[in-house]
Image (cartoon, rainbow, N blue to C red):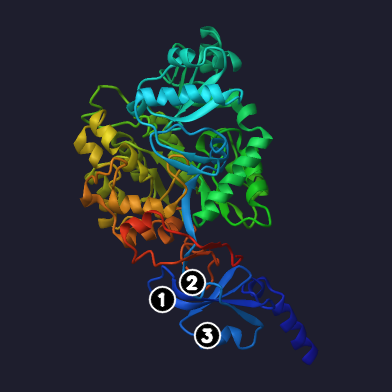
Amino acid sequence: MLANRRAVLAGIAASPLLAATGQGTEITVFEARRIVTMESGLPEARFMAVANGMVLALAGTLDELSAWTGHRQHRVDRRFADKMLFPGLIDPHIHPMQSAVMLALPFLAPDEWHLPSGHWPGIVGQDAYRARLRKLVQEDVTDPLITWGHHELFHGPLGKAELDEIAPDRPLFVWQRSFHEIIANSAGLRRIGLGDKARFEAAMAAAKVEPGHGDYDTGVFSETALLVAIGKLQPVLLAPERMASGFAGLHQMMRERGVTTTSDMATGIFARFDTEAGLIASSFGRSDTAARVMLMPMAAELDTADDLDAWMMKARKYASDTVLLDRRVKLFADGAFFAQNMRMGPPGYADGHVGKWLTQPEDFHKQANRYWDAGFSLHIHVNGDEGLDLVLDAVAGLSRRVRQSVTLEHLGYCTEAQIQRIRDLAVMVSAQPNYIRVLGEAYGREGLGVDRASQMNRLGSLERYFVPLGLHSDFNMAPIDPFYLAWIAETREGIDGKVRAPALQLSREKALRAITIEAAQVIGMDSMIGSLAAGKKADFIALDSDPFEVEQDALKEMPIAATVFEGRV
């Protein structure tokens, strides 16, 4: 009988549940001046017990942890005794492949950037931009030369003719500030095999590019035509040395700014899903990684799969403890906000141009129904209010399902009435707050008018309607810096120093929730991360000050003393 009892106990001790709670391993108790948990029931503590990467318990005193420490080997780690501990930050929308590619490029943008590659000052004015581009052409021997950050409203018009004058003899590609557009000079078009109009138009036709998205005369590859240019440039963009350097820079930025979790909101932009998932898994699956990533396929790639269950099963070979794959899919409605390609409802654009659909409305409805009926949660790229009408009408036609969710990605401009629909349909939002900061003045001057431009990023209304909200960088649309994004959402201060529509500012609490627990919620991970609580991952950052109490300007550049991932400092 005793032998049987011992066998049973041995089996219990070896069970996955006890292994997960850290039985048999040393407990580390982290002491802090204060631990801000982002949990309403226990908002703060001073001690946190951790084992096997999991939070076991939080307490105000060491004695209150005795249920765990009284019979277990443990040590008290006091390195953060004079610090504030805060949940690991979440950027719910980064494209790791895009980040790795972009970090290898020179940044010539209207806004300032601090990157692993150095400091890139903001550039405003056509003459200043072209002078900087000429200087780069003279000094940078990279072949082909690819730059990022041009925006017509800050830098003046740019096309093939202008680039030919600046660089008549070498391939030059300029990536627009939105990422959704590339401009090539004549040498660049020749380099990628599209040097004459017949070949260019044949490539557009073969890729089924939407009318008006590609233009040989101006050298423009926009929206659906962008994928043609990316495909042609793939050997350059995905060169092994570029990838290694780019991923290293991405991990550096995430660690330095406290980001412990992200979601790749479109695995397969630069290559097929398998190629990108393999590269991301190799980077984030290392034993020394300090962050996890969720992969997410695009609907356009899944559209060709007859058996979605089989496709997902095959894709799981890339999954690990730090590379996650859930039943989620990315859909695209309208075009880029930074390029004024979003579909705007009445009265439209002031200059009369019309935005672009990334997915035609009838096709979008078909995708939404197919993937929802197949059990997928939907993440939908949408930027303009006309685009949002399409999305909300499609969502309204879906059956309610407890285990599935819909998240709107970006949501640059919407109306108050649409926010009420968002609430009524139980839709969540992952917002890009940098629109109001970079574009508020420019879009008031051209495109939208002062009234609508000032009401971009209607985040305060989302808070008043209790809509779950995450804030994301979508790097390189904004820096990978959640505290900076929270500061933008709280202040709505433009790069010109002007505050626009203060009634739409977020409260400090909502802004911080949008980079922690609600950021986790919009990607379906709030049971695992986003706050510090028993049973959750031991992801946290060490700070000198409490982000709830610092002045607004301090939140903008919040120093982070350490980033801890699953209990590993």
Report whether 46 appears left or right of 235. Answer: left
Helix, strand or loop status at disc 1: loop
Q: Which residue is mark 1?
A: 42
Q: At which x and y percent is residue 541? A: 50, 64
Q: Residue at x 80, y 88 (%)?
A: 3
| Residue 207 can be seen in this image | no
| Residue 148 can be seen in this image | yes
Q: At which x and y percent is residue 60? A: 46, 82
* Mark 3–mark 2 distance (CA, rounded to whole Å): 16 Å
Helix, strand or loop status at disc 3: loop
The residue carrying pointer 2 sits among few (fewer than 14), some (14 to 19) or many (20 or more) residues within 10 Å by Cα, namely: many
Q: Earlier in the sequence, mark 1 or mark 3?
A: 1
Q: Are marks 1 and 3 in contact (CB under 8 Å)?
A: no
The circle on residue 533 is: 2
Q: Earlier in the sequence, mark 1 or mark 2?
A: 1
* Mark 1–mark 2 distance (CA, rounded to whole Å): 8 Å
Q: Which residue is mark 3?
A: 62
Q: Earlier in the sequence, mark 3 or mark 2?
A: 3
Of the 4 image quadrants, the one containing the C terminus is bottom right
Foreground of the two, 503 or 387: 503
134 in relation to 37, above or below: above
- The residue sitting at the bottom extreme is 2
Helix, strand or loop status at disc 2: loop
Q: Are marks 1 and 2 in contact (CB under 8 Å)?
A: yes
How many circles with numbers are drawn on the protein?
3
Report whether 266 appears left or right of 388. Answer: right
381 in relation to 67, above or below: above
Name which residue type carries label 1.
Leu
Foreground of the two, 445 or 512: 445
* Mark 1–mark 3 distance (CA, rounded to whole Å): 16 Å
Q: At which x and y percent is residue 136? A: 51, 26
